[in-house]
Image (spheres, helix red, strand yellow):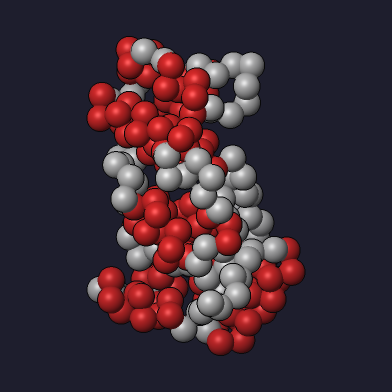
Amino acid sequence: MKGILRLTRESLRQGADELRRRDPRLGTWIQHIGEVELRRHRHRFGALCRSIISQQLGAQAARAIHLRFVNLFFPMLNPDPAQLLQMEPASLRACGLSERKAQYLRSLAREFHDGSLARARLGILEDEQVIARLTHLPGVGRWTAEMFLIFSLGRLDVFSVGDLALRNAVERVVGRKLKPRAIEEIAGGWSPYRSVASLYLWRVAHWPRDPSPQGFPRA
């Protein structure tokens, strides 16, 4: 079993330097964006709840529903599986959740309370093993599992071709439309720092202007 590569301040810096050396097109963006940070979501049940809540919603609506959901557990700061299982379904729907998402959250709570994730040591599993564990759950697809790998487990070498913003950013860096397979091949050249590339690409996706001969304006 290969060693698990993790995102740290040091590996973020090392990864950025290596990506600049390997890929001058991405390197131009890295140079002008500057340092990026990873904000870890260390409460694993809460992170997966938030991912399920946010599916197919705009950012503003997702934040509002998630805030109402978290407030159900006050004064606790994070959702608790046992407490969620004791709630009436109407309480979850009152937050703005669809019946299906409420069912997904209850299924997730059962797995964390006394199911396969109750004592699972996800932190020691390799990336694909974590994805396999999570994607058997209702409402958890590969994209959700990959976001969990980056933002909860802090894995260093993850790229989600299912993420629209990442695909758009790669096309912006390269300067042309690309098929998903071509994007995956490009991302493969960034290994083992694909998570570092992803953190920059999410910034690229929302950067105001492209580089110009007069310089690259900062946001």
Relative placement, left or right, of 112 versus 96 is: right
Say which residue appears at 46% left-offset and 83% top-offset.
189
Q: Position of residue 150 (x, y in %)?
A: 53, 58
Is residue 37 among what the camera can see? yes
Q: Quadrant of residue 51?
A: top left
Is residue 50 among what the camera can see? no
Q: Answer above or below: position of 82 versus 195.
A: above
Question: Is residue 26 or residue 140 the one in the foreground?
Answer: 140
Q: Position of residue 101 (x, y in %)?
A: 31, 31
Say which residue appears at 64% left-offset and 64% top-offset.
7
Q: Answer above or below: position of 163 versus 194.
A: above
Q: Position of residue 143 (x, y in %)?
A: 37, 55
Say which residue appears at 28% left-offset and 76% top-offset.
181
Say which residue appears at 53% left-offset and 84% top-offset.
23
Relative placement, left or right, of 104 versus 27 is: left
| Labels in figure, total | 0
Question: Is residue 154 or residue 167 the one in the foreground?
Answer: 154
Q: Residue furthest right?
A: 10
Q: Position of residue 208 (x, y in %)?
A: 50, 56
Question: Is residue 202 or residue 80 the one in the foreground?
Answer: 80
Q: Answer above or below: position of 84 versus 111.
A: above
Which quadrant of the figure contains the C terminus?
A: bottom right
